[in-house]
Image (tube, grey):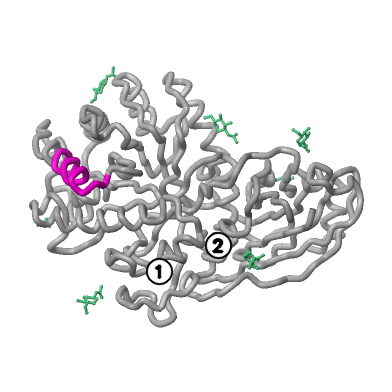
Amino acid sequence: MLWSIFASLLAAGLVTADNITATVNLSVSKGKPVHWASGFIYGIPDTPNQIPDHWYTDIGFRYGRAGGAQLEAPARGWIWGLSEYKGRLESTLSNYRTCRKYGADFILLPHDVWGTDHANSSTVWPGDGGDWSDYDLFIKTLMKDLKANNALKGLVWDIWNEPDISIFWERDQQQWIDLYIRTHKLLREDPSFHSVQISGPSLAYRPVSGNTWWSNWLAQIAGNKTIPEQYSYHLEGETSDWDNDLQNTNGTLATLLQNYGLPDRQININEYANYGEQVPAGAAWWISRLERYNAFGLRGNWLGGWTLHDLMANLLTKKSDPTDYNATDYAPAPEFQVYKYYKGNMTGHRVETSGTGDRLFDVYATVDSDKVRILSGTRITAGNWQITVTGMSAVGLPSEGTVDIQTWGFAGTSVYEEVDSPSDRGIVSHTYSGDVLTFPIFQTDASTAWAFEFSR
Ligand SMILES: *[C@@H]1O[C@H](CO)[C@@H](O)[C@H](O)[C@H]1NC(C)=O
Ligand SMILES: *[C@@H]1O[C@H](CO)[C@@H](O)[C@H](O)[C@H]1NC(C)=O
Ligand SMILES: *[C@@H]1O[C@H](CO)[C@@H](O)[C@H](O)[C@H]1NC(C)=O
Ligand SMILES: *[C@@H]1O[C@H](CO)[C@@H](O)[C@H](O)[C@H]1NC(C)=O
Ligand SMILES: *[C@@H]1O[C@H](CO)[C@@H](O)[C@H](O)[C@H]1NC(C)=O
Ligand SMILES: *[C@@H]1O[C@H](CO)[C@@H](O)[C@H](O)[C@H]1NC(C)=O
Ligand SMILES: *[C@@H]1O[C@H](CO)[C@@H](O)[C@H](O)[C@H]1NC(C)=O
C-alpha cells in the first residue's frame, strides 16, 4: 500500500493508529543493556573450543541450557546405567564450561541426563509406583558429580523440561508436581547448593487461567514453600496464537501469582521463537519483547542429532556442509548479524518502547553519546507501520527540525545462508516538530529486520 493511501485510511479512521504505531520515548531510561535475549539452548559442540571465541562474544552470549540430549549409546542417560549417565554428564559439563568461559550462566537439563529421549511409556519414570529411590539416587549422584567438577557457579537447575508434552513426561500431572517439590527440597537441603538457582516449571504451554499444569503446580509450590528463583516457560507456539506472546503472558502470570499468594521472580523464557521465526525480523521482534519485560530468553533449537550440539541454535552456518558436525568453517547465519548489532552497536542506555497494537511490529532502542539506535522487527509478516519517537529534546536535539536517519537492513531467509553484514540502505532526512518524530516502515517481506540510527 502506498503511504499516502495508508495515511488517508488512517485519517478516515479505517485503521487505528494504535495498531500501526510503535513508540520510543527518549525521556525514559530503562538502564544499561544486559542482552536479555542473547541465550540459546543446546547449540554448543561437545568438543571444547570447536566454535572460536568471537562467535560467542560478538553476541554477548548470556545463557546456555543443555544436558546431553540426543546422544546415542554409550551416552543415553541414567536409565541405561551409570556409564551411559556418565556419557551425558561429560557432554553437559563440557557445555557448562563453554558457557562459563564467556560469562554465560548455564541451565542444567536433568531430564536429558535422565535420558527422556531414549525412554517411552514402558520404561521407568521418576516415582513410578510411589518408589522414588532410583530418582533420589539420580539426583544425589548428579549433585555430587556437579560439585566434584566445580560446576555450581552460574548454575540454574531446571527441574524438569516440558512435562506437559508427552515425549518428555509419560506419567500423570501429579507425579510431575511431586517430582518438582521433592527435587526442590533435595537441592535446598544441601548447603553447598545454596547459590544454585532453581527454575521451573518450564512448561511448554502458557501461564493462563484454565491451564491446570500451571494452577496445580502453583498451588502446591505455594503450599510447600518450594518457589523457584526463576519462573520459566516456553513461547514457541504459532505466531497467530494470542497467548504465545510475553505481552499477554507477563500479565496472565502476574494474575496467577497473585491468586496463589506467590511473589514475583525473575522470568526466564528458556525457549523462545518457533522455527519459522528464526529469521532477522523474528529475532528483532523477540529481542524487543524480552527487553521490554526484562525477561531472560533462550532461542529455541529446532535441530537434531549431532547438529543439535552445534551452530548456536542456527545463529551460525558453515561454508561447506552445516550439518557436518566435524566441519569447522563457521559462517554467520542471517540472525547472527541482528544479535551482533544488538550487542556490539546498541550501547549506552535502553529507553522505553511499545509495540504496535496489532502485536506484529516491535522496536528496541538505545541512546549512546553519539547516536540513537532503533532495531525493529515483525512477527514474520509484511505490512505498513510507523515508529513515533518522543522526547527528542531529551537527547539534546531541538524540539523541531530535521534528522538524517541511516537505515541498515538485516536480510536472509534461510538459517543455512551466510550473511556477512547488514546492508546500508541509505540516509533519509525527516522533519519533525513538537518534540516528536514519526517515520513510516514499509515492510515488503516477512524476514528483514531494520536498524535506524540518527545522531544526537
Ligand atoms: C515519555 O516519558 C515522559 C517522562 O516519563 C512522559 O512525561 C511522557 O508523557 C512520555 N511520552 C509519551 C508519548 O508517552
Ligand atoms: C520402549 O523402549 C524400550 C527400550 O528402548 C524398548 O525395548 C521398547 O520396545 C520400547 N517400547 C515401545 C512401546 O516403544
Ligand atoms: C505439598 O506437595 C505435595 C506434593 O508433593 C502435595 O501433595 C501437597 O498437597 C502439597 N502441600 C500443600 C500444602 O500444598
Ligand atoms: C510484568 O509483570 C510484572 C508483574 O509480574 C510487573 O511488575 C511488570 O511491570 C510487568 N512488565 C511490564 C513491562 O508490563
Ligand atoms: C567426527 O569425526 C570423528 C573422527 O573422524 C568421527 O569418529 C565422528 O564420527 C565424527 N562425528 C560426526 C558426528 O560426524
Ligand atoms: C557497529 O559497530 C562496529 C564497531 O564500532 C562498526 O564497525 C560497525 O560499522 C557498526 N555497524 C553498524 C551497522 O552500524
Ligand atoms: C487491530 O489489530 C487487531 C489484532 O490483529 C485486529 O483484530 C483488529 O481488527 C485491528 N483493528 C483495526 C482497526 O485494524
Query: Would the CB of label 2 be found within 8 Å of ligand 6?
Result: yes
Callout 1, which amino acid?
Pro
Q: Position of residue 82 (x, y in %)?
A: 8, 51
Q: Image quadrant of residue 191? A: top left
| Residue pictured at 74% horizontal, 48% vertical | 21
Density class for disc 1 (Cα within 10 Å; few <14, some 14-19, many ≥20) is few
Residue nearest the viewer, comparing 337 with 175 = 337
**Residue in view at x 24 percent, y 36 percent:** 172
Residue situated in front as seen by the camera: 278 or 196: 196
Q: Is residue 451 above or below residue 156?
A: below
Residue drawn at 21 percent across, 27 percent down: 189
| Kind of residue at badge 2 | Lys
Residue 136 seen by the camera: yes
Which residue range is magenta in the image? 139-151
Q: Between disc 1 and disc 2, whose residue precedes?
A: 1
Name the residue carrying label 1.
52
Name the secondary structure under disc 1. Answer: loop
The verdict on residue 68 being magenta is no
The residue labelled by disc 2 is 340
**Residue 236 visible in the snapshot:** no
